Image (cartoon, rainbow, N blue to C red):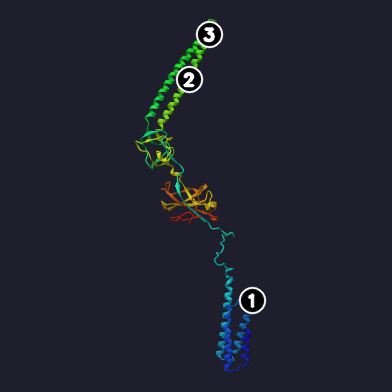
Amino acid sequence: MFEVAISAASAMFVGMNTTSEHDRDLAAKLRSLSTEPAAFKTEPPEPLARRRIIPWTMLLLAAASLALVPLSGPQTLERVEAAIAAFSGGQLATSAHEGEAPAGGGAAVEGRPAPVNDGANRMTLPTREVTGSGTVVAPDTAIVFSKYEGRIVAVEVETGDKVAVGQVLVRLDDVGARFALRGAEISERAAELALEARKITLAQAGSSLTRIERLAGRDAMSAQALEEAKTAFDTAENGAEQARQDLVKAMLAIDRAREQVEALVVTAPISGTVTRLGAHVGDTVLSREDSVRENESLLAITDTASLVIDADVAEANIALMRPGLAGEAVLDGFPDRPFAVEVAKIAPVISREKGTVTLRLSLTAPPSGIRPAMAARIRLVVGEGSAGAHHPPPSFEAPAVGLGVSG
């Protein structure tokens, strides 16, 4: 390229008084110089040695143009300057285009995000969310039955009432139980009288034995009389002991009859809320031994202060589950009031029908209106970002409505 430029400059020096045709040849050669740099756009980058020659070529062309200033017309000078400008502009554009590649420190792979550095020259694994659904459960629930058969004469509570341990719930009446208590009290009194009589007989037999033994010592009483006195004393002593046992039995009968009568007053076994009431005045209820179904019970009490959530998650996520894993739950009844949960227990078996594992979750600050059997949806955060966390991240949003079990 620059050989052609030198030849053109030499021709100008030799033929200073050439014709217009010579000027046209020079213009054609200069135009070829101005259009040649376009090839740089498609050709591979030149070696470093070639890029170093380009500035010297530009200097030679500039020197040639200066030498032609006093020998040629103004049009020839303008053509030379235009050719030099075009040539230098193409080379500069090519150099600028080649210099853009290393600006970013390396080429990025298309479709693959750049690695994320967490400040410790290691990659951070993204967190993963495990969703599931379940219900609110009250683990402390007491189903109250009547221990003995009876007729309901009073119901002291209503559904929703708060009760304490030992508070009276239902009063029953059983005439047979009251008669049994009265009969036991009479039997106890009879046993006491019989014991007193046996004690008197024993005292008499003891006095007689003592007198006969004294007379027999002086040979004033026969051996047979002494033997009969000893037999009478032993018999009286056995009679007194039997009377004592009869009294004990009578006392036990009273305790049993009294316990049955006292059981007619049904009290609360735990503190909580009356969540179901099936007792009505005038109804006759069966004893606990004969009542095997829950709907035959008097009422149900639930400790609403210790509610939990039993939720099912996909079996594929069981390897990620562990006690202490934190997350968030939302109730269908309170969709705008999410609260924190934590895995307390993991079921030891898998549901074959649903392909899920059940988690028991403890609750932190649930809504005040939470009730057992409410539908709940949960979301747990697992992965490197959740290790050791006991609370969901600040950006943790409530699960959307209709959230299902994820694989």
Of the image marks 1 and 2, the number of the one nearer the N terminus: 1
Q: Is residue 74 above or below residue 250?
A: below
Q: Specify the amino acid type for callout 1.
A: Leu
Residue 194 seen in the current view: yes
Q: Residue at x 64, y 79 (%)?
A: 50
Question: Position of 109 compared to 362: left or right?
Answer: right
Query: Under tag 2, what secondary structure?
Result: helix
* SS state under label 3: helix
For badge 2, the amino acid type reads: Gln
State the separation of the CA atoms marked 3 and 2: 27 Å
Q: Amino acid at mark 3?
A: Gln
Residue 39 spot, x, y in % from top left:
58, 80
Query: Who comes first in sequence, dot 3 or dot 2?
Result: 3
Q: Earlier in the sequence, mark 3 or mark 1?
A: 1
Find residue 71 and name its label: none
Q: Residue at x 46, y 24 (%)?
A: 249
Give the vertical position of 194 relative to 102 (above or below).
Answer: above
Please name the residue that numbered disc 2 is placed on.
Answer: 242
Q: Residues within 10 Å of mark 1 (few under 14, many from 20)?
A: few
- Along the line of sight, the residue nearer the viewer: 222 or 165: 222
Residue lying at the far right in this picture: please name it: 49
Q: Given contact means CB atoms under 8 Å apart, are the residues at marks 3 and 1 in contact?
A: no
Find residue 59 and report its image quarter: bottom right
The residue pinned by badge 3 equals 224
Residue 299: % across, % down:
40, 39
Whole-number angstrom distance, CA of label 3 to CA of label 1: 150 Å
Residue 65 vs 212, above or below: the answer is below
The dot on residue 48 is 1
